[in-house]
Image (cartoon, rainbow, N blue to C red):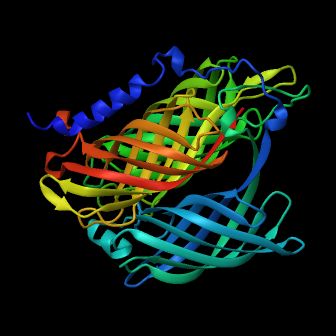
Amino acid sequence: MTKPKQYNRFYFAFLFFAATQPTFTLQSMQATDDTTKIDSSRLKTEKGLMVFDYEVIPIAKNQSIDLLGVHYFAKWNDWLYVGFGLHAPMVRGDYGGFMTFDSTIHVQRNIFEHLFVDGGVSLGGGGGGSSVKQSVELSGTGGFGKGYLGVGREFDTFSAGVNYTYFEFIDSSIKSSQWNVFVQKPFSYTIGSYVDSTKMIELPYAFLEGSENILTLETNTIFQIDPKGSKTQTIHALSLQFSHFFTNAHYLFFGADIGYKGLPLYNQALHGIGYRYEFSPRTHLRIQIGLGSGGYSPDDIDTGSGLLVYPKILLEYLSEENLGWSFGGGYLVAPLGTSKNYTVGTALNYHLSVKQSSTKESAILKGFRFNLFAQTEFDAHVNSKKHHDIKMLSVQLDKLLNENWYLATQVSVAYNDFLGYPGYGEVAVGFGMQNKYVPSSRFQNFLQLLIGANVYGILFKPSIGTNYTIQDNIALYGQIGKTMSIDQMDLYRKDKNLRAYFIGFGFTYRFSLL
């Protein structure tokens, strides 16, 4: 009867914080319109880069591993970019499930007409291999660094070039220099001030249709067909997908799935193209095909080199202008392995920027935050045995529901080992409460409750923290909380019960969208 005590301090903190906030109802969670409309001149254009790179890394006494990298960089000034990304194998060796996650500082400068030089440094974590033993050989403790320098050329709609790179995992056999090739796609987007989140904005008289973007959170069930690996059970996963429409019907997407039950922390990342057919203004059929990489370990689930192909169909119903629900399924196959799967999922689709027309006079600005931070789980215990600190790189997306409530999605990857093995990670979703943002006060405090998963099952992660304003769209981020495994109802392996406190520090990029 003593176990519940570890939850009590967070329950009391939650109740105290909730008592100081507005009454929580379903209606209160909807974005609230400011009675005073703000002018569209307060909108501004931000620029960034989507970068794809590919390299082949030789490994002593093993087959080479080829890594496809996908990175998002936000433009800081004329030559400096910051962002995050991931790497995953494609067609060489048996490395299905190997994956890395990183943060990057990127510099780029034109030197002659369309020619430019670029360079950067990435730090992150990850791992994987054809077996647990090989994962330790390839990934060491899970932390890695990458540096690169190269040249490129700008074309009409994209850029391409080559870099000389150095890629090293700490205490591992991956430690090599090689050339890579890259393609960059510049993009721009219109944002509002963070302080204007949830306010009504007047649109220009001739406001044209803009690009539509959709953020999808899905619970996905993966049914294995005649599996050859040692893990034959059904995989339950959380999926996060971002879709960008370049016409009213056609879109590009990038998505990632992480398992939480059956095979916790099974992982895959895919990008591709889709088509939308509108039966009515509220009912849509979407067909998409993705290409990417994923798995766990070829011994457990045989995705071979990691290459995945994933055709999928979804039926969506819009319950509100910017909120939809969908049900769909697909066929997930590893062409260079034996893994074949049917998938079924239900999803919540948030339309980040809906189509605007010249007849629309106003719109509500929706608030968002990207938090990039280092998270350390300390005073960690697995059952009653003391474990060393678990150090992770974390990204969290917050969607403001109103001034005081937000929806949070968090992904974390360790850059040191857990129980002696690299590649530890966590994924979590939940709600947070915060005080209203006031420009005259630098602090915006929050309390959040997240439910997530690691390799052994379901976790509960309550925390408190703050954003400290540097400028309207940039803040320092800090939080402290506790990680607790939920071992009731067979949601967590009882012999791997985890509990730890955690602390996180980093940066927040915050803004509002139409």
User: Visible in this render: residue 169?
Assistant: yes
Residue at x-position 37% and y-position 53% = 503
Point out the image quarter for the N terminus: top left
Image x and y of residue 487, in percent? 19, 40
Answer with the quarter of the image where residue 211 lies: top right
Q: In this view, does 369 lie above or below 376?
A: above
User: Visible in this render: residue 330?
Assistant: no
Compared across the picture, whether 218 is left or right of 48 comes to: left
Image x and y of residue 247, in percent? 77, 37
Answer with the quarter of the image where residue 235 lies: top left
Point out the image quarter for the C terminus: top right
Image x and y of residue 129, in percent? 36, 67
Residue at x-position 73% and y-position 33% = 249
Compared across the picture, whether 482 is left or right of 469 comes to: left
Q: In this view, does 136 lie above or below 32?
A: below
Q: Nearer the viewer, residue 177 or 275?
A: 177
Residue at x-position 37% and y-position 45% = 259
Q: Is residue 115 above or below residue 236?
A: below
Answer with the quarter of the image where residue 122 lies: bottom right
Count of labels in the image: 0
Q: Nearer the viewer, residue 397 or 236?
A: 397
Residue at x-position 35% and y-position 50% = 265
Q: In this view, does 417 lie above or below 163?
A: above
Q: Which of 50 and 469 is in front in this view?
A: 469
Image x and y of residue 436, in percent? 56, 31
Q: Which of 328 and 504 is in front in this view?
A: 504
